[in-house]
Image (tube, grey):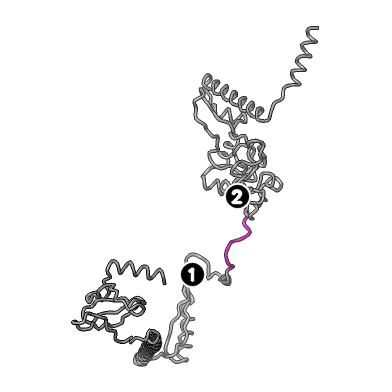
Amino acid sequence: MSSMSSMSLMSSFNAKVIVSEQMERLMSLAAQELAINAISACAEQYSFDASEAIRLLGLVSVKVCRNKEAKVEAVKASFPLPYSGECNDAQCHGLRQNNSLYTQCQVARKDNNDFCKSCQSSSDKNSGTPEYGTIEQRQAVGILEYVDPKGRKPIAYTKIMKKFKVTQEQVLEEARKMSMNLDVIHFAEPVEDGKRGRPSSKKEKEVKEPKGAKGRPKKTKKVLEIECDEEDLFASLVASANSDDSESEEEELVVKPVKKGKSDEEREAERLAKEEQRLAKEAKIASEKEEKAAKLASEKEEKAAKLASEKEEKAAKIASEKAEKEAKLAAEKAEKEAKLAAEKEAKAAKEVQRLKEKDAAKANKSKKPAAKIEVEVEADEEPDVVKKIEIDGKKYLKSKKTGIIYDYKEYTTNGEQVVVGKWNESKNKIDFTESAEESEEEYEEED
């Protein structure tokens, strides 16, 4: 009864346990760390290489820790290894260039993503596929037939072996340490289709026949040149035939008639004639060369003179156009200024005429002379002659004798002599009195 109840409790307990993906990953990492710590402890106890043991157990993508204080050591091959034809599902599914070998990325996958951070970024930039492709695309074709999205192919691994100066045995040993199985096709030298470059247009040289067998040459027949008549020649041949039957066959006498050659004088004359012809030819070539150089120098001078003349003409033309333009602008400016001055004079004359007409109208209206006004003074004094002036649009009466300024409006309207100030000759203006300034302000407000 107790066993049944315990089993029911266990089943109910198991039913309620829910392990999340994150918890599962943490548990897996904890198990890996525990395994590494165990291997490290055994290595210290029994004196063996912990890193090699970790590689043999397939823990190449984990951290090696000793006493919980060891540094992180990434397990890498001593030199680049070729594509093995297999896919490690625990690693990123993207391809890396790896010295143009296009092998699987060695970074561990995270959060069930197919690519690591770098390959994912490359995939986002290239329409969902990393720059060098994926391990699935590499497995879909032959080992040496892969072409990446940009049309590039892996290079022969034998070139990498030459570059890093490693042998086939060293490569296989390194692959065994990394738990990789390599195809022997990687160690075969690539077959080239032919030499690169443009085909040679030269014809193949004809094979010459051998001139003779190698070694010491055979003795040749001696040739005697005899300058004589034909009858003597035949006689000597007959005599030699009868007398030299017992001589060795190694040397054989051959006599042939030779025509008489040219004399030394003739040969010298021919040599001198050839020398003269050579000298004449050299002199002709030198003369032609000098003529050509003189012609080129003359053409160069003519061209330089022509360019200088064209340059001067162009400069003169530009200067003339500039002077004409400046003269035209000056004339237009003078004409414009004269026109403005005339308009200004006409406007001033018109304004003067308007003021005169206005003054005349006012004078007629007040029935008092506008040109000359006599200010009343006492009987024993002479009358003060004043002159009408206009300052800032307002009219005043100025005494010619004393310079006193009277109010024009008050005098013409009411006949009163209201002093508003005195004329300042140095400043050419009216120095108003305080009462006059107040009245001026009142006057302006009324206007």
Q: Position of residue 242 (x, y in %)?
A: 48, 81
25 on left or right of 234: right
Q: Nearer the viewer, residue 73 or 101?
A: 73
Q: Residues within 10 Å of mark 1 (few under 14, many from 20)?
A: few
Separation of marks 2 and 1 at Cα, in angstroms? 58 Å
Q: Mark 2 sits on what residue?
A: 156
Residue picked out by circle 1: 218
Is residue 358 rendered to the left or right of residue 196? left
What residue sits 28% from the left and 66% below the top? 434
Helix, strand or loop under label 1: loop
Foreground residue among 69 and 272: 69
Q: Is residue 242 left or right of residue 267?
A: right
Q: Which residues are magenta?
A: 189-199
Q: Quadrant of residue 115?
A: top right
Q: Amino acid at mark 2?
A: Ala
Q: Is residue 269 visible?
A: yes
